Structure formats: structure tokens, C-alpha cells
Amino acid sequence: MLGLSGKSEEWPFPGKFWEANTVADFWSKWNPAVHNGLLKALRFVRRKARTRIVVIPTVLFIFLVMGLYHDGVVWLLAGYWEDYGFQYIFTIFFLMNGLVVILERLSGLSIPLPVMIKKILTFSWIIGSFIFSLNLNLHLLY
């Protein structure tokens, strides 16, 4: 099955995310089971509706649902009993990454950089966007 990056995904979770050269490539490799399951579900909906699925709202919807899911699990496991309240750390994180995936897909540009630099930039973005969403949430909380 082809992923967001256009490459075949056959590895179980966690996928070979360390081979990612772009953010879209990272997310298609991070959890191939979920990625492939969502692609199959979207293809099923497209076939039943006999229409094309528009990429931008679909990608944003998937990243939004994944963020809310992760925030919900954290809230159920930690926040519910500690009066922590529902946080949106993962939702912000996933939406930021969803926007980058859309920009990558729409631009179609491939910057001619060495592979190692692309990997460093990709992982810097993933880690930096999580730290930003965590910091933003803590700032809004207190």
C-alpha cells in the first residue's frame, strides 16, 4: 500500500520512521497499521460515495481525530483522577504536523539537500512542534 510519501509501507508499528526524509514520510512510517487502515477506510468511503476525497480537509480531519484521541487517552489515564482537565497538547501537535504534510503535498517541491540534513530537519520539526505544543498548552493553563 502506498503511503503519504508514495512509498510502500509493510513494516508493523513502530515503522521505519528513522528512514523518513520529510514530515509526511515520517507519519506514513510512524504507525503503518493505522496509516494503512485509514487509507483503506477512505478508499472505501470514496468507493461508496462514488466521489473523490479532497486531500486538505481529509488530512486535517485525520490529524485532528488522532490528536483528540491521544489527548483523550492521556486525560482518561492521568487527568480524570487528578483533576488535570482535558488538554490539547496532542491535538495542537497533530494539527501542526497535518498542516506541514499538506504543504509538502501541495508544493511537490523536493529541496536538494543531503539525505542526512533532510532527516535532521524532519526530526527537528517533529520534536520542536511537540515541545511548542506542550509549552503553548502549559502557558495557557497557568
Image: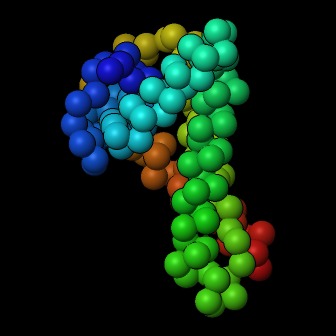
Instruction: Residue 41: tell me if it is visible.
Output: yes
- Where in the figure is residue 12, as x and y percent of width and height? 24, 42
Apparent side of residue 38 relative to residue 54 in the rendered image (left or right) = left
**Looking at the rendering, which quadrant does residue 111 occupy?**
top left
Residue depicted at x 45% and y 26%: 40
Q: Is 122 on the left or on the right of 42, as rendered?
A: left
Quadrant occupied by the C terminus = bottom right
Residue 59: x %, y % from top left: 60, 30
The structure residue drawn at horizontal position 61% and vertical position 89%, both measured from the top left corner, is: 81
Q: Position of residue 87 (x, y in %)?
A: 68, 68
Identify the image quadrant of residue 46.
top right
135 shown above or below 35: below
Q: Is residue 28 above or below residue 133?
A: above
- In front of the other: 40 or 29: 40
* Image point (53%, 55%), residue name: 130
User: 24 left or right of 95?
Assistant: left
